Image (spheres, rainbow, N blue to C red):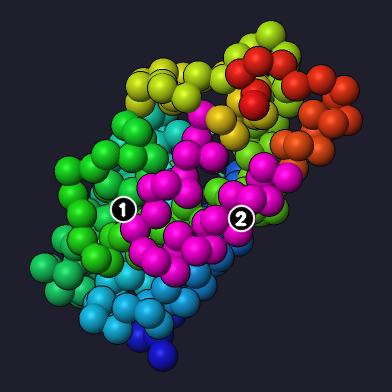
Amino acid sequence: MSSVLVLKTRDYAQQELSKAEGGHDWEHVRRVWQTSKSLLEQTPEADAEVVELAALLHDIADSKFHGGDEEIGPRTAEQWLKSQGFEAERREHVVQIVRHMGFKGGGVSSFSSLEMELVQDADRLDALGAIGIARCFSFGGYKGNPIYQPDFKPNPGMSKEEYKKSNSPSLNHFYEKLLLLKDCMNTVAGRKEAEHRDAFLRQFLDEFFREMGERPEGFE
Ligand code: ADP
Ligand code: NI
C-alpha cells in the first residue's frame, strides 16, 4: 500500500506534468512508478516509500525543458517534500536520486543506492520496447529532428554535452542510447524485461530497413 505522502505526490506530479511533452508526461511517470513498484516486489529490503517518491518526482522539472538548469528537478522535488514535512534524511535520498537519474554522461553516476537502481531500471525500461519507440519519435518530433537520414551516421560515443546538443535523426537515437540500455540494467528482473524490449527494438529496425530496401553502414 502506498503511503498518504506517495498518493499526494502522485496528484502533485500529475498536475505539474499535465502539459509536458508526450515522452516526458504524467503517463511516462505513471509507468515508471508502476514498474518501480513491480521491481520492489523482488526487492523487499529497499525503502519502498523512497523508491515510489523518487519515481514520481524523477522528471518533475527536466533541465531539457528549463534552459539546461540541471538543479531545477532536484530543487523542485526538495521543495515539495519539505512542504510535506518529509524527514530530512530520506528526503535527501529522494533528491539525490532525482539529481543523478538519467543516462547523462554515459550512465556513470557519482551517487548510487539500491533505491536509485530500481527507479533507474524502471526509467530505462520505459525507453525500450514499443513504448520506447513511441517516445523516441515523439521527442525527436518535438525537437524538430528528422526521422532518418542515411548519410547522418549514429555516434554512440557522444559526451554528455554533445548528447544534449545533438539534433541527430530519431533513428540514430536507437544506436546512440536505446540499444545500449540493456547492458546497463541494475536488477535481474529489470535486465530480463530489458532483453525482451531490446529484442523488439531490433525487430523494428530490421523491418524499417527491410522497407527501406537497404541498410547503410553504421545502422547494423
Ligand atoms: P533521461 O530521462 O535519462 O534524461 P532522456 O530524457 O534523454 O533520458 O530521454 C527521454 C525519452 O526521450 C527517452 O524515451 C529517449 O529515448 C527519448 N529521447 C531522448 N533524446 C532523444 C533524441 N535525441 N531523439 C529521440 N528521442 C530521444
Ligand atoms: Ni523519465
Q: Mark 1: which amino acid?
A: Val
Query: Which of the two labelled residues, at mark 2 and mark 1, occupies the earlier sequence position?
Result: 1
Question: What's the magenta region?
Answer: 176-203
Nearer to me, 8 or 191: 191
SS of the residue under disc 1 = helix
Nearer to me, 193 or 69: 193
Give the labeled residue for mark 1: 98
Give the labeled residue for mark 2: 197
Which quadrant of the figure contains the C terminus? top right
The answer to whether residue 36 shows anywhere in this view is no
Nearer to me, 133 or 92: 133
Residue 7's quadrant in the figure? bottom left
Distance (Cα) linking label 2 and label 1: 24 Å
In the image, what residue occupies the spot 25% across and 76% down?
46
Residue count near mark 1 (Cα–Cα under 10 Å), binned few <14, some 14–19, many ≥20: many
Residue 127 magenta: no
